[in-house]
Amino acid sequence: MKPIRLGVNVDHVATLRNARGGAHPCPVRAAELAMSAGADGVTAHLREDRRHIRDDDMRRLKDEIPLPLNFEMAATAEMIRIATDIRPHACCLVPENRLERTTEGGLDVAGNLPALTDAVAALKAAGARVSLFIDPDPRQIEAARAAGAPVIEIHTGTYQQACDATTNARISRELQLIRDGAARAAALGLEVHAGHGLNFHNVQPVAAIPEIVELNIGHFLVGEALFMGLAESVKEMKRLMQDARTGGLY
């Protein structure tokens, strides 16, 4: 079975910094800690309203952290220009609603295929590995391939909501949708990632899906860092992921 990578999202270290102003806590320092704990990459979302990560954070993460940087972004002219200038390892195109607290679902690639095809082409030309953040919907998976993206990231937020509701039938249904979506995407030649709402309690069934090669996790790890430290929360997440991957109990 392929190994699985952990990308640590440092957005909400920046959220805490911005709540008070100033420079502390620093998301770049958080990325350094995550790297020391075994993270395979760093993810950060530069939003239009700069509610957490700021432009300088992205530049510092690219320049100072020797891990792949995954630049989450909306497919806007401004963000494409910034990403083309910074040249991160990867760009993940996500939907963005100014009033949302966090990303609420996957991109409608099928409904916005021409614009997303152009965005994917521009970012690929700048040397980025491009992924599209989508729900595990066959129509959206097919559209992601048509748009020219080599990678999809499956939105696992609905699965997380099912886990929080503790309804076993709903959990099984949502997990099967992720399994089916991952298998379909891999059969089309796409690399498969997943993320959103994953935590110590629900990550292993997703990490055990053989087609998924990367999980991107942030809010939970930053929140759990208040109790056990960021490095320890990253180490525990990686342990759970690797145990699931190698057939450990969950």
Image (cartoon, grey):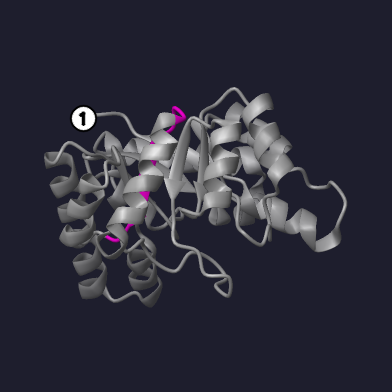
Q: Is residue 69 above or below residue 75?
A: above
Residue at horizontal 46 percent and vertical 55 percent from the top: 199
Q: Main secondary structure of the magenta part?
A: strand
Quarter of the image for the N terminus: give it: top left
Q: Residues within 10 Å of mark 1 (few under 14, many from 20)?
A: few
The answer to whether any part of residue 177 appears in the image is: yes
Residue at horizontal 83 percent and vertical 47 percent from the top: 24
Q: Quadrant of residue 187?
A: top left
Q: Residue furthest top?
A: 66
Task: Judge from the rendering whether residue 196 lies leftward or rightward of residue 50; answer left or right.
Answer: left
Residue at horizontal 54 percent and vertical 35 percent from the top: 84
Q: What residue is shown with label 1?
A: 1
Q: Is residue 20 magenta?
A: no
Q: 81 or 106, which lies in front?
A: 81
Task: Judge from the rendering whether residue 102 lies leftward or rightward of residue 189; answer left or right.
Answer: right
Q: Is residue 130 magenta?
A: yes
- In magenta, the rendered stretch is 126-135
Q: 153 or 77, which lies in front?
A: 77
**Residue 141 appears at what percent x and percent y?**
21, 53
**Residue 12 appears at what percent x and percent y?**
65, 55
**Residue 235 appears at what percent x and percent y?**
53, 36
Q: Amino acid at mark 1?
A: Met
Task: Judge from the rendering whether residue 102 lies leftward or rightward of residue 171; answer left or right.
Answer: right
